[in-house]
Amino acid sequence: MEIDKLLLDASLARLHHLAPSQVELAKLVSEVVRAVTEIFDLAGAGVLLADADRALRSIAAADSSGALLERVQEECGEGPCVESFITDEIVVSEDLAAETRWPRVVPALLDGGIHAVLGIPVRLGGGPIGTLNVAADSPRVWTDSERDAMVHFGAVLENLLLAGLIADRNDKLARQLQYALEYRVPIERAVGYLMATRKTDSVSAFEILRRTARNERRRVSELAEAILARRRVL
């Protein structure tokens, strides 16, 4: 898709000037998601944030497609956006119908009219705390200019979240953001431990951690800390 550079620059400039000290942080995140959807003519977009209970939790979605994209990945613990968070890299799918990487989420996304997805890591405090996720309603070749622009929107999101923390907000999203920073490290370390002991990749290790916590009705962060303290062997 050809990007309207003037519209893109104007949108980024407007978002850069949003102030978490004056507006609810969740509304600012939703503004970024809405802008991304409009600029790129997307079926949906949203943001996933690291969470102590479920590993990842949806905090914003532009519409029903964005909500579906996030809900399915949150429930299944796999998908392009989950993988983007785990690997701290951009993850792309240009045609979900041809995908073999995420067998549990792809059928639901296709049934919901989502055919292409892009996951962008959102970083804070030296590492990923979540992802900016976008969806198209038909197969789509994500161009280099689109990817670069999405990274810029991800940077805007990072700046807003950081400013929200500095502003010492006590609203729900600010508290969840603090949780994300606190629990990201033990979850990452537990994933690394499982990779070494299970001889598996990071995505599979993350799923082992998430699935075990869910089966035992424990918080992912609690299980991660038990694994690191060698009080739990998976």
Image: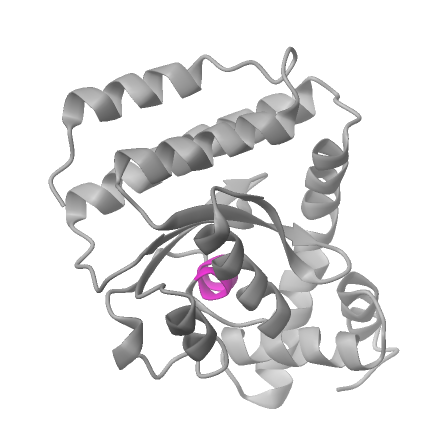
Vertical relation: 186 (above or below) 75: above
**Residue at horizontal 63%, vertical 16%?**
23
Residue reaching furthest to the right? 231
Could you say where residue 32 lies in the image, as x and y percent from the top left? 45, 31
Q: Range of the magenta residues?
A: 81-87
Q: Is residue 132 left or right of residue 222?
A: left
Taking the image as shown, residue 144 lies to the left or right of residue 157, namely: left
Residue at point 35%, 50% (across, down): 43
> Hey, which quadrant is residue 8 in on the image?
top left
Q: Is residue 175 left or right of residue 85?
A: right
- How many numbered callouts? 0
Q: Is residue 121 above or below residue 189?
A: above
Q: Is residue 83 magenta?
A: yes
Q: Main secondary structure of the magenta part?
A: helix
Residue in front for this viewpoint, 111 or 38: 111
17 relative to 86, above or below? above
Residue 187 shown left or right of residue 219 in the figure: left
Q: Residue placed at 59% from the left, 27% from the top?
A: 27
Residue 211 appears at what percent x and percent y? 69, 79
Asked if residue 13 is among those painted magenta in the image, a careful observer would answer no
- Residue 192 x %, y %: 60, 71
Relative image position of residue 129 (x, y in whole percent): 58, 48
